[in-house]
Amino acid sequence: MLRYLGTGQRNYAQRSIRPDRRAWWEFEAALSGHIYPILDGGVAADTGQGARLWLFPPQIIHGWMGNGQVAEVVVFHFSWVPEGIERGLCSQGPVSMPLTVEQVQSIRASSALAKEHLQRPRASSQSHFMRIAAELCCLLWEHLGDRPLDNPREVDRQRVEDALQWYRQHLYLSPSVDAVAQAAFCSPAHFRRLVHAHRGCSPLQALASIRLRRAEGLIEAGDLPLKAIAQEAGFRSHEVFSRSFAQHYGVSPSRWRDRRRHRG
């Protein structure tokens, strides 16, 4: 979920970040001072002085430069952002916005919370990371402008994604497919048709994928006991979790964790 967090004072004029591809969604905020991105080919995208937030989609070549001032910078790399960002907010590439004093304080607080959960992972850590990503996206939506969903297929797709997001937020309760369909305000049969149309799989497969991704993220985040991970990721029992994980990844959760530690 949260793949990287960087905070602190930076002087990008003295130590610039060379243009390169990032594998994840990058939120970079200048809470004070002045920085600006360098795009592919060395083109500077200087937006002027003042606190600012940028969002770059994955694989967009860019780097960072400054004007000589020391800047307070916060950088988040997320593997996930809410549905609608790629096709809506970032359909034309990276976006940015100026930050108010209140927004600067909010991002600073979010970075402190993220740092705390990275240093001492807990069962709730992935939920906090997801909330931080969503709040940053909402800031950009509010500034750049939201839009209605006029296309019926787009409305149906958003209904599916909203229901799956509801499922992610309630994983610890192990909701049934019927409960997720109810969250989408449709019958189980209609929900099944919508998921097939927009995800190309059954609701059971879509929910299983979400559980496994959450479990993988929790395993990578730290030393949370596997039984606690099974519960947080929405599995009915530790045995079901171990069997499902091994079927999908080819190794048990404990072996997966051992391999990650060895690589680290």
Image: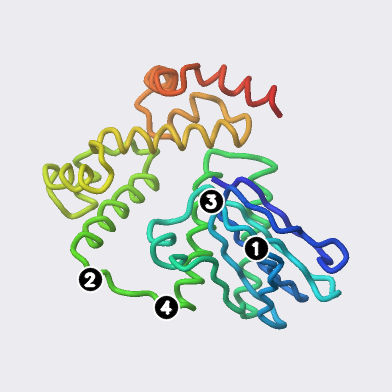
Label 4 sits on what residue type? Gly
Q: Is residue 6 above or below residue 45?
A: above
Q: CA distance from mark 2 to mark 1?
A: 35 Å
Q: Residues within 10 Å of mark 4 (few under 14, many from 20)?
A: few
Mark toward the start of the polypeptide (2 vs 4): 4
User: Residue 98 — which label?
Assistant: none
- Residue occupying image coordinates x 29% and y 73%: 148
Nearest-to-viewer mark from 4 and 3? 4
Residue 128, disc: 3
Amino acid at the residue labelled 1 = Asp
Task: Tell me the kind of residue under disc 3.
Answer: His
| Closer to the eye: label 2 or 1 | 1
x then y, percent, for residue 212: 42, 32
Query: If you read the primary sequence from the N terminus, does the residue marked by circle 3 or circle 2 appear first?
Result: 3
Q: Residues within 10 Å of mark 1 (few under 14, many from 20)?
A: some
Asked whether the beta carbons under mark 2 and mark 1 sit within 8 Å of each other, the answer is no
Sequence-first disc among 4 and 1: 1
Q: Which mark is residue 150?
A: 2
The kind of secondary structure element at disc 1 is loop
Task: Determine which residue is flagged by label 4.
Answer: 145
